[in-house]
Image (cartoon, rainbow, N blue to C red):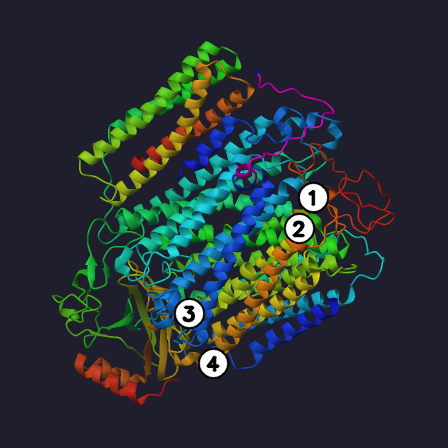
Amino acid sequence: MGKILALLIVLIVVGSVWSFVSGHWWFPVGISEHAGAIDAQFKRTAVVVAVAFIASQLALAYAVFKYGSKGSERAIYSHGNNKLEAIWTGITAVIFIILAFLGQVVWYNLHIRDAAPGAVQVDVVGQQFQWNFHYPGKDGIMGSTDAKYINDAALNYVGLNPDDETSKDDIQMSILVIPEKRPVAIKIRSKDVIHDLFIPALRIKQDAVPGMNVAMHFTATKTGKYEIACAELCGSLHYNMKTFMLVVSQDEYDQLSAMSEDKFKERINQLMAAEPLQ
Amino acid sequence: METTITTDLKIKTGMGAGGGKNFGDDGGGPQGADSNSSDWPPGYSPEDAIEPTKYRIAVWLGLTSIAMLFIALTSAYILRQYNGMTAAKPDWQPLHLPSALWITTAIILLSSLSFEIARRALKQNRYEKFKTWISLTTALGFLFLAGQVLAWRQLASQGIYLRSNPHSSFFYVLTGLHALHLLGGIVVLSYVLISAWRLRIGLRKRTTVEVTSLYWHFMDGLWVYLFVLLFFF
Amino acid sequence: MAEVMHPTHGEVHHHEPPTGWLRKYVFSLDHKVIGIQYFFLALFSVFVGMALSLLMRLQLANPGQKIAFLATLFPQAAKDGVVTPEMYLSLVTMHGTIMVFFVLTTAPQGGFGNYFLPIQIGAADMAFPLLNMLSFWTTFVALAFMIAALFCNATTLGPIGGWTGYAPLSALGNIAGPGQGIGVVLWVSSIGLFCIASLLGALNFITTMLNLRTKGMSLMRLPLTCWAWFTTAVLSLLSFPVLMAAGVLLLLDQLAGTSFFIPTGEYVSGKLLDTGQQGGSPILWQHLFWFFGHPEVYIAILPGMGLTSHVLSTFARKPVFGYKAMVYAIFAIGLLGFFVWGHHMFMSGMDPRTAIAFSLITLTIGVPSAIKTFNWLGTIWNSRMRFTTPMLFSLGFVSLFVSGGITGLFLGQSTIDIPLHDTYFPVGHFHLIMGVAAIFGIFTGTYFWFPKMFGRLMHEGLGKLHFFLTFIGVNAIFIPFHVMGMVGAPRRYSTHGDLQYLSSVMPLHKFVTYMAIITMAAQFIFLFNLFWSMAKGKKAADNPWEATTLEWDIPSPPPFDNFGGVEPVVHHGPYEFSVPGAPNDFVMQTDPMVVEGQEAE
């Protein structure tokens, strides 16, 4: 019985390790400046996890294999070993705490440090069940919004203030367009319930919370078309609250920025049709 | 719903050992058989295992969980107040303190005092005195609840209801939950009172009086805390 | 003055059991009957929860497929026998809630704790038997409410919100879409009742353990199971009131038009909600919920950890390695569990600076967890293991605890949580550790204590078959969840087929569903074994496992007042196995014998 269990544990270890390292399943290609750092922290942690996981499971398998009952022979009578205990505890504590500290660097850069000046502005508004992206338009100034102006039927999804001069040229669209290699500052909110803007390729995930305006910033490094999903349960069609992100060249983005709403959307639709999904 | 925690506890307290199956409940247990104090771990004596301790522990635990309930609500209150006052369109409108609450605060403070006098009288075996003061305590308890209802009516007459604004929501929730818990205390007190008038205050009922006084003082302190939190914080 | 106590000496206090059927089996005050009631309540719930997960698995493997029997069972919710997205989400919600509350919280604590805590400390019953009965029946009513919630929304199978019921989705009522309104009201009410029941139980457990220990049962002679139940009760006592507070506020938002959790300017279903006050905070619900929710994870797993230590030592025929370290580790896990709730909220929009603190504290929980693992390995090292079914399950527990727990090192870091949050990765993580490992704890308890509870042995062959199928099955189901999460598969999706970057997870979904079906089928072996053994199993001796603690000192099943009115006296620690010089390889706690080779306590 012990031998079967030992074999099984070894097989589980092999299977688990294989599923992680086989290459069939891994994070999507990271296309943001911080993606590499997140992935590196993941790999560092994975090394610690793998060593601890394999060592504990194999020790368990070995013990189960080796220490089966042998007739009336007795086990070794011992209540433990404080010295071993202290060493083991000390080592794990040190490793875990070092890991925890290392992990904070990326977090600090993403969430606590302010966005670089001159970053491209996009406001994100979640609703059941679509994403709205609000661009400042030609004047480069984000027009003011308020919930009382929201009117889905009139396509004013984000609640642009019609009386505000700066909002006249603003553009709202369900596709996220950003330039490559230029910092992007987004503000995320929601109209109804909590959603979560999940852009796997960017390694970005942030709840869109009604009543809050959460700021984030990032820099995309590669052009292309990528998928966006919702990662917080928001109601019946949660699974289908998806859209796309277009990362365009800086030239293209500058041209887009100078366009009126109709032209902007037309160009985006062209690009959407032309770009293959990454 | 809230009050069940404590009323059940209290009813239990009054009824003694419930199933009556514990070794301790008739004084056997630790003192029985070949009791030898050296069998007990340090700091733990046979006396620790007799009934009153059990109820005292239980009431302290019950009070801990009630405290957690109100701590949770307090944190919600403080956060909501902060949000309501700092928002672009502040929606936190502080209530005017209903005058009835000054009176109820005085009443509940007095009830604690009279409970304490009653408790000491019982300790000195002065039954008549105990009876008088425990009756007064119970009456003050009812009076307090009546006063709270009056305060709610005062607010309602100004058109301030549960959903009117965040402060009134919290006011009704906090005072309502406190009143429910106090009602639990009153139920037990009434039971003690009836026993007292029928001259049936045995050792177990004395435990009931002891632990109920603990609970009562806590409810008193909790009220003062809520009063300060709601109107002076 | 009939109530004055008369200390009596040398007298046996034997109590007669009640005679009426109702008082004996239904409204019983006997902790053993109540324990068995809890056990069966959890058994019923676990099969309901499992059935819900089967429907989820069928949908995920072949999205949109028609399942003939569903159309018959739920003509409105499952139109044409297809699991609709709404129905899928209600399945998710009900599966999670039922499993967490009515299985993982109920069985280890309410079931085994109730039955064995008093016996293991040498008491005749819990401190407050009436309270004990009340807490069971309150749990029962709570379950009735929860089951009612399954059938109250015609187009779904219960509320939609996940077991976490995030506001404002859960606070807005019918306007927020299908699966809201009455279903959520029943769901919250059920949880409120469950809170009350758990508080009554916790109070009883703590008082019992502090006050009713028998002679000689010093704190450091308590079986580790008792320490686990005790710590669990403390966690319940401190965390359930907070959930209660959150539940009361949510219920008022639903029914009374308050807006504790509903913010200003809500534009829902094409309408601006502008009535009354609306400056509530959705994040507040999360803070209150997770302040309860994280300790709840330990409420589910700690009894399993205690029992694993206990059973490993018993069948390894070797004392627990580092008994005191084990006790302190349980405390440390319980204590730290109150300061890490924020790691569920890294993406919630809360102040990012707090995430750093939560990250650091979360990783320190890894330290006491590592102590436990190390000590379990230390216990079986150089031992002489007997591979009975309960032993296999507790070895399985250790393996699952390692597999499930260690991925917490990823999720506890806010940085790595960015790609992994709300994907299948945490789903795999918590299913392994708080789901399956805790369930393995429950199986360990069942196979280990069945002889004591029912006076008969469970069938070993069937038990081992059940173990191997389940152990392979749960690993094959939940390890793939981790890699699906790395690819980026979001949880609570009725299909991943609509997102192209997830194409590689679709074959895994099929594989997992096959494994789930095998694993679920294996549970019927358990169910059969359980009921068959109750009637036909081999008669059990008083101490069939040659164990040391007090429950093995009395008949199987124990008499009404456990020790027949005689108070047991404890002379040894709980894990005196293989003591050199002792006649047997185990020294019972009640054995007055002084053995030369025994280590000083």
Which of discs 2 and 4 lies nearer the camera? The answer is 2
Tell me how far mark 1 sits from mark 4, CA to CA. 52 Å
Identify the element where label 3 is drawn.
helix
- Front one among C64 and C493: C64
Find disc 1 in the rendering and name its residue. Answer: C551
Q: Amino acid at mark 3?
A: Phe
Subunit under mark 3: C
Callout 1 amino acid: Glu
| Residue B103 drawn above or below residue C253 | above
Q: Using the image, tell me which numbered label, if any, was put on residue C504.
A: 4
Magenta stretch: residue C4 in it?
Answer: yes
- For marks 3 and 1 on the same chain, the one whose residue lies earlier in the sequence: 3
- Nearer to us of marks 3 and 1 is 3
| Amino acid type for the residue under numbered disc 2 | Trp
Numbered tag placed on residue C509 in the rendering: none
> What whole-number distance in Å separates the C-alpha atoms at marks 1 and 2?
9 Å
Query: Mark 1 touching mark 2, by CB under 8 A?
Result: yes
Q: Are marks 1 and 2 on the same chain?
A: yes
Q: Nearer the viewer, residue B153 or A145?
A: B153
Residue at which label 3 appears? C69
Tags 1 and 4 touching, CB below 8 Å:
no
Q: CA distance from mark 4 to mark 3?
A: 30 Å
Q: Looking at numbered disc 4 in the image, what kind of residue is underneath it?
A: Ser
Q: In which quadrant of the rendered view does residue B23 lie? A: top right
The percent coordinates of residue C553 (x first, y second) are 74, 42
